[in-house]
Image (tube, helix red, strand yellow):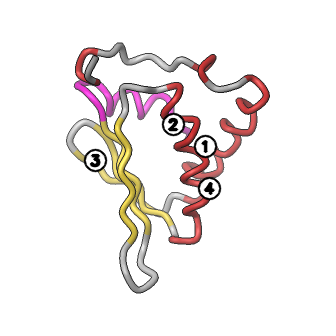
Amino acid sequence: MDNQHMPLACLVEAIPEHERSAHFQLAADLFRHRAEERKDVPNGYAFRFSPDTLEQVAQFLANERRCCPFLSFDITIASGGGPLWLYITGPDGAREFLAAELPG
C-alpha cells in the first residue's frame, strides 16, 4: 500500500512501550528547542537544525517511521558545516496532521 492510501493516524503502539516516553521527550526537545526554522513544503514541512543534531534526528526517525508509516522523511546536510534539513511529507492532509502532532 502506498502512502497516498494509508490512514493519517499515529500507531503509537508500533513504538516499543519501553521506548515511547523517550521518543516523545526527544520529539519535544527537537521541535520545541532545537529546530531553528520551519518551512512549509508541499504536503508537509522542512525543519532546519544544526548539523550536530544528526544523531538525535536519526534516533527520532527510527521510531517515528514505525508509528507514522504514511510519512516520508528526507535529510539533507549542507557541505562545509552547513545546516541539516529534515523534510517530513506525506499524502494530502499530512501538513495539518503534523501541525497538530509535532510539539512546538
Q: Position of residue 81 (x, y in %)?
A: 46, 82
Q: CA distance from mark 4 to mark 2?
A: 15 Å
Give amino acid for label 2.
Leu
Closest to the camera, between mark 4 and mark 2, is 4
Say whether residue 102 is magenta: yes
Give amino acid for label 1.
Ala
Which circle's residue, 3 or 1, is located before the other in the chain?
Answer: 1
Q: CA distance from mark 3 to mark 1?
A: 19 Å
Which is more toward the observer, 56 or 47?
56
Answer yes or no: do the residues labelled 1 and 2 have beta carbons within 8 Å? yes
Answer yes or no: do the residues labelled 3 and 1 have beta carbons within 8 Å? no
Among all residues in the image, which is located at the extreme front? 1
Which is more toward the observer, 39 or 25?
25
Closest to the camera, between mark 1 and mark 4, is 4
Closest to the camera, between mark 3 and mark 4, is 4
Answer yes or no: do the residues labelled 3 and 2 have beta carbons within 8 Å? no
**Residue at the disc numbered 4:** 56
Classify residue 77 as left or right of residue 102.
left
| Highlighted range, magenta | 90-104
Q: Residue at 46% x, 28% y: name it.
A: 100
Which circle's residue, 1 or 2, is located before the other in the chain?
Answer: 1
Classify residue 15 as left or right of residue 77.
right
